[in-house]
Image: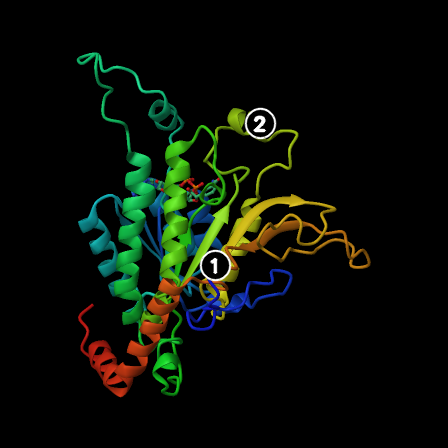
Amino acid sequence: MGYHDLTETAKLSPPVDTSQPYDITRVAGKTILITGGAVGLGAALARHWAAHGAHLIIGDINDTAGEQLVADLRTQHRQGSHHYFHCDVTDWDAQVALFKAAARASPHGGIDVVVANAGINLPTANHRFENPLADPSDPDAPPRPDTRIIDINVTAAMHTAHLALFWLPRNGPGKMSPGPRGSSPPSSPRDRCLLLVGSVAGVLPFVGQVQYTASKHAITGLFRALRGSAWTHGVRTTLLCPYFVSGSNMLPTAVEAAFLAGGAGGASIKDVVDAATRLVADDSIVGRALLVGPRVADAEEGQSGGEGRHSNKDGDPGQETKVTASIWDCYAEDYKDSETFIWRWVSMLNAVEKAKGVVGLVTDLVAILFRRN
Ligand SMILES: NC(=O)c1ccc[n+]([C@@H]2O[C@H](COP(=O)([O-])OP(=O)(O)OC[C@H]3O[C@@H](n4cnc5c(N)ncnc54)[C@H](O)[C@@H]3O)[C@@H](O)[C@H]2O)c1
C-alpha cells in the first residue's frame, strides 16, 4: 500500500540491538514518575533505578506498600530524592495532583521519565464479558459489564500519557527538541522519556482475556501513533511488552502452572527490568518497543523475534546459533513503508517545526523560564 520510509522523518532511532550493552549510569539524576509502582514490576523498576542514582516518584493506591517502598529507597539510596503520593489513576484530578507534586519534589523541578505502569487484569471480568447472563432484575438485558480493566489500563494510561506530554517538555532544555529547529543543542540537555507499559497481549490475542487484550492493544495503538509525533515535544516514546512474568502478581501460582508449565515458561522480572532500563537509560532509543519473553535456548537468531530482529546472546560465544532470546524489538517496521496519508502528516509536522524556527525556540525558552511548577 505504501512506499514512504518515514523512519528518519519521524526521528525514530534504528531497531534496538539488545545484544549490545547500554550505559546504566545514564539513569542517575533522572526524576522518574511511576504510576502503580508500589508493588510488582513498577516497584522492581523503582528499586533498580534508585540503586543507580535516579529520583523516584511513586503514585499508587496501595499506601502501605508505597510508603514502605519509599522508606526503603530513602534508607538504601540516600543520594536520591524519593517520594510516594497516593494516586488513584482513574481520578483525573488525582493524576494532575501527582504530576504537580512530582515536579515540586524533583531536585531540578522537572520530570524526565514517566512510566505509565498502573494496570490490572481481572479474570472474572474477562470471563463475564464473553458470557453475559441476564440481570436478575431484567431477564432481557445483562447487567452493565465491569470495565475497570479498560478504565485503568486504557483511560487512565491515556491520561498519564497526556500529562506526560504536558510535563516532560517543562523539564528544561530538551535533548531532541532543538534538533528539528536547527539550533545547536543546549550544553546540558535533559532527556524526556514516556515509557508505556503494554504487554504481549497488545501484540497477540490472549484468548479468554478479551478486555485485557483489548486494553493492551489500545496501548500498542497509542505507542504506534504517538511515536510519530511526540518528537515535536522532544519526547521519546517507548513501549515495554512483557509476556506473563513469572513470580509477578498477574497470575495466581496455580493459574500460572496450568497455563505455562511444560511450555517455554514466563518472562523473568530480571529481563523485564533490564529491557525497561535500556529504554530509559539509553536516550538514543526513540520510538521503539521491546518485547520481553521467556528465555528460549537454541533458537535460530531472528526466528523467535517475529518482526523484531535482535536477541540477547549470553550462551557459549563459540556457538553462534545458540541464542537465548528474551528481549527483542517489535513493531520495528511500522514507519518503513508508510502510506501517503501518514507520510503527508509527518512531513507536515516537520514543515511546521522548521517554520517555527527561532520564534519557537524563544517561545519555549520564555515558557521554561517563567513556568509555574
Ligand atoms: N506481570 C505480568 O505478567 C505482566 C505482563 C505484561 C504486562 N504487565 C503490565 O505491567 C504493569 C504492572 O503489572 P504488575 O504485574 O506489576 O501488576 P501488580 O498487580 O503487581 O501491580 C500493579 C500496581 O498497580 C497499582 N494499581 C492498581 N490500580 C490502581 C489505580 N487505580 N491507581 C493507581 N495504582 C493502581 C496496584 O496497587 C499495584 O501497585 C501492568 O500494566 C500490567 O498490565 C504485567
Disc nearest the viewer among 1 and 2:
1
249 is higher (above) or lower (below) than 160: above
Three-letter amino acid code of the residue under disc 1: Asp
Instruction: Check disc 1: other Cα within 10 Å, few if <14, some if 14-19, many if 20+.
Output: some
Q: Is residue 113 visible?
A: no
> Where is ligand 1, by quadrant?
top left
Horizontally, residue 56 falls left or right of residue 323, namely left
Residue 195: image x %, image y %?
Answer: 41, 57
364 is higher (above) or lower (below) than 24: below
- Judged from the image, the secondary structure of the residue bearing numbered disc 2 is helix
Residue 72: image x %, image y %?
Answer: 42, 51
Q: Residue at x 39, y 65 (%)?
A: 340
Horizontally, residue 309 falls left or right of residue 352, namely right
Mark 1 C-beta closer than 8 Å to ligand 1: no
Horizontally, residue 313 falls left or right of residue 187, namely right
- Judged from the image, the secondary structure of the residue bearing numbered disc 1 is loop
Q: Residue at x 33, y 36 (%)?
A: 149
* Residue placed most toward the observer, 146 or 96: 146
Q: Which quadrant holds residue 143?
A: top left
Residue 159: image x %, image y %?
Answer: 26, 52
Give the residue pinned by disc 1: 334
Can you say which quadrant of the picture contains the C terminus?
Answer: bottom left
Q: Residue at x 50, y 46 (%)?
A: 242
321 is higher (above) or lower (below) than 359: above
Q: Residue at x 39, y 24 (%)?
A: 127
Residue 371: image x %, image y %?
Answer: 19, 73
Among numbered discs 1 and 2, the one appearing first in the sequence: 2
Three-letter amino acid code of the residue under disc 2: Ala
* Residue placed most toward the observer, 127 or 274: 127
Residue 257 numbered tag: 2
Instruction: Check disc 2: other Cα within 10 Å, few if <14, some if 14-19, many if 20+.
Output: few
